[in-house]
Image: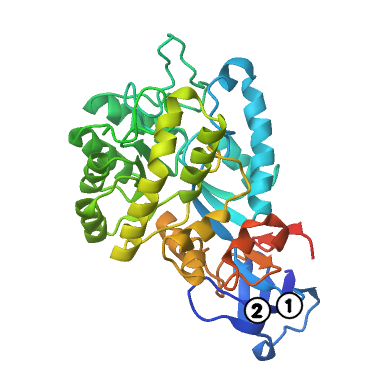
Amino acid sequence: MTYFLIHNGTLIDGTGKPPVSDAAILIRDDFIEYVGPEDSLKLPGVKIRKVDADGGFLLPGFIDSHLHLMANGFHMEDTMYNPLSLFFYKAVENMRRTVNAGVTTVRDGGLADYGVKMAVEKGLIIGPRMQISVTPLSITGGHFDFWLKSGFDMKISYPGFPDSICDGVEDVRRKVREIMRAGADVIKVMATGGVISANDSPEHPQFSKEEFKVIIDEARTRGLKIMAHAHGAEGIKNAVEAGIDSVEHGTYLDREAIDMILERGVYLIPTLITQKYNRIKAESGGLAEYSVKDALRIESIHRKNMEKAYQAGVTMAMGTDCGVIEHGVNLQELGLLCEIGMTPMEAITSATKVAAECLGWQDKIGTLEAGKLADIVISKTDPLSDINSLGNPDNIRMVLKEGKIIKDFL
């Protein structure tokens, strides 16, 4: 039995409660045993490893509800020129940057397979705890169809990574079963087109209502949640009406879509940072020609609609879509959430308590409470005074995952 004490810090526990100064966290093995004022802590009569937080701020390990650990910009030509194994080696660095940024749990929206998850769980590589979708469901010509008009198909295909394309009720049923067989923890469906895809636009709805019903029914047989990539209003409504659990992006949601989301208790994952970076890349020539027009026009639309959704009371969980953009900038999303109206505390809870609830893991992560896994971040600066400071990995002084230090700059 190993004890670990972190003290001399200000506690921001992820629940939304006011900070607690002169706080301490006592860890036993993987779990939190005590969290609260240091002067109320009764230490056990055993040897304890102590860490002085040096006046820093103690926060839960952050949760990114939408990213792609195996992706590095979704440059289609990479699949033509690079060996498949290179994607896995690059993912090791992507995971290191993710945890060093203070993100200890992620929901991967596509490309990470069961072996990547196993490698982290077995301690072969350092990375965040993950839920994986393996590969998203896409219609022919949809957002995860990498066939080009030249006739080339840039898809990645190998055992353990099913092809994503499916059309029609029976094909969709078979594909969901294949993806669950491959080890998916969550089902990802492309309900609309996307910004960086070659064959569609963000407004285009994808999958019929009948196909959606089959997707939902099959996922529920194993108790899995469904995340829906959805930009256009019609696709958002189709997905929400069918019973999905979270809307990813939500660019063109309108009042009716907002009301449906509220009525059904659906989570919204804004991914503001990716819309921002895509616009910057489009302006500088960093995106493929077929993506530029969409990237330039949707950022301001997306931001305005996220403001409307927040003001209406939609529950938002932090997600970034890192992988489309560079890895390690995850917590810059918190500052952007504040720009649409959140307080710094609300932004923090969106990436801790709320995100844990979105993933269905609220019983073990998301807040600093006795009995939960000891995922802890120590920030040098006060995020409630400067939320953007969390977006600078240099301010993340220590990261613990399940009581084990995986970054130590104290």
- State which quadrant residue 340 falls in: bottom left
The residue under label 2 is 10
- State which quadrant residue 325 falls in: top right
Locate residue 45 relative to residue 167 in the image: left or right.
right
Q: Nearer the viewer, residue 48 or 295?
A: 295
Q: Nearer the viewer, residue 33 or 86?
A: 86
Under mark 2, the amino acid is Thr
Residue at 37% over, 45% down: 227
User: Gap in Å between the C-alphas at discs 2 and 1?
Assistant: 7 Å
Decide: marks 2, 1 in contact (CB < 8 A)?
yes
The residue under label 1 is 55
Q: Is residue 328 above or below residue 405?
A: above
Locate residue 220 relative to residue 390 in the image: left or right.
left
Under mark 1, the amino acid is Gly
Q: Nearer the viewer, residue 198 or 61?
A: 198
Mark 2 and mark 1 lie on one chain; the one further toward the N terminus is 2
